[in-house]
Image: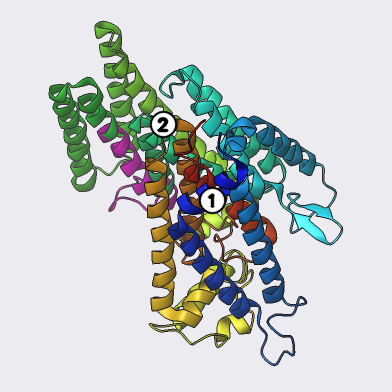
Amino acid sequence: MVQPTDRKYSVIRSVDWWTIVIYVALLSLGWLSVCGASYDYGSDTELLSLSARSGMQIVWIGTSIVLGTVLLLLDDRLYDTFAYVIFAILLLLLFATIFNPHSIKGSRSWLVLGPLRLQPAEFAKFATALALAKFMGTYGYDITRPRDFIKTLLIILTPMLFIVMQRETGSALVYLAFFLMFYREGMSGSILFTGVAMVLYFVIGIRYAEPTLWHTPTSIGYYVVFLMIQLFSAVMIGVYCQRWDKTILCLSICIGVTLVSTLFSFFVVPFNLFWVQLPLTLFLMGYLLWHGLRTRVHNYLWILAFSAGSLLFFNFADYALNHVLEQHQRTRINVLLGLEEDLKGAGYNVHQSEIAIGSGGLEGKGFLNGTQTKLKYVPEQDTDFIFCTVGEEEGFVGAAGVLLLFLTLILRLIHLAERQPTTFGRVYGYCVLSIFLFHVFINVGMVLGLTPVIGIPLPFFSYGGSSLWGFTLLLFIFLRIDAGRNAANR
């Protein structure tokens, strides 16, 4: 029987110290960034003072290190055994937070306990990851079986729903990162492809809805989206039905009819090509339905569902943007897509952060010497937009170094996840790296104006205890699971 002291020494020997080194490096660079973002010119406040955010961040860092140490000392079997219990507790907290009377910046996602403020949504990430790993690690689970896949989706959608009800849409979107783990565990690539296609439909269709094709009354957005639906559906016949002859036939008809109609509209009589492309798409859908019923090959019907879903989504996306989303959400999307500028409103944060990063140049202005951040031109510059401080003070070299450090962490997590002997450990590991990847990609992207501003923190950099503890829980639980992968006498 393995004694407790032996287990502790075993953890020390087998824990992945490279990941811990990266963690400490990110914490250190994050603290320097918080110092740069919160420091005021001419202020008498010391960086280590608890009255300054830089001083409080040291407290959060210190407690996070203690939390990580405690997590490593616990038996790794506890995380598997109590996964559902932890998930249920966090769900109750999320549900209770909906009725929280304290509203901070329009969001009810915070629990206020005296001087302490906690955001349960940050801790629900690791709880959801544990629940997913527990459920997907059960005997007989098969993600390709609809019943199992729907149950798995419910584990994700439940906390997402509660968080949306707290008016914290950005935090809810983070849970979409779990689909990257689903793909690793055997989810059909068609689902991931469908998600990418929907994004393309939305961006192209909305962005180019008004411009017209040459001198015709045809919307470029509608023209391109309909053509994409036809091309995607035709190629899927070859990929999923292994009938490339039918793919060539469908592509020839769709491209040929579209090309002839376009030339006729441009050179002879201008007309809206929508009235050609819609019947052409419906004809292709009818062709898929006929072949599916005639051959009893279900893949034809799945491709038909993709085509019909694409049409419905495209039309619903336009309606949702203009009639469902709030005005500020609609403005943010329009600013991102270049339909509006609004430098004094929704686009102000991004515009100022781009100025700050651009002013840093190659090598930056130096620690505590950033003018844009010191003069508080960038709102939320020590939380959601803290990466602009890195760009201004450390320049392109420093910003690239931080991104390389995050890339190293992601690659290391992939290595650790792949060496797990259990499905539970592998699934949890991929959940962790998916969340980190989503946060880094979206946060840095919104600072650079490449992704929507949804208000999520940069791991280990953004100021705050809830996010720092949440990321520490995610990472160190996985490190403990990894450290116990070869434990004896289980």
- The residue lying at 37 percent from left, 48 percent from top is 415
One can see residue 46 in this view: yes
Q: Is residue 489 magenta?
A: no
In the picture shown, does residue 280 fall above or below 473? above
Which of pointers 2 and 1 lies earlier in the amino acid sequence? 1
- The residue lying at 65 percent from left, 33 percent from top is 82
Front-most of 213 and 87?
A: 87
Few, some or many residues within 10 Å of mark 2 (<14, 14–19, 20+) = some
**Residue 411: x percent and y percent?**
37, 53
Q: Which residues are magenta?
A: 205-231
Model colouring: rainbow
C-alpha separation, residue under disc 2 versus residue under disc 1: 59 Å
SS under mark 2: helix
Query: What residue is disc 1 on?
Result: 9
**Residue 407: x percent and y percent?**
39, 59
| Quadrant containing the N terminus in the rendered view | top right
**Residue 350: x percent and y percent?**
53, 68
**Residue 470: x percent and y percent?**
63, 52
Tell us which disc is closer to us: 2 or 1. 1
- The residue lying at 30 percent from left, 48 percent from top is 216
- The quadrant where residue 244 appears: top left
**Image position of 238 (left or right of 431):** left
Residue type at numbered disc 1: Tyr
Label of residue 311 in the image: 2
Label of residue 181 in the image: none
One can see residue 210 in this view: no
- The residue lying at 62 percent from left, 71 percent from top is 382
Q: Is residue 228 magenta?
A: yes
SS under mark 1: helix
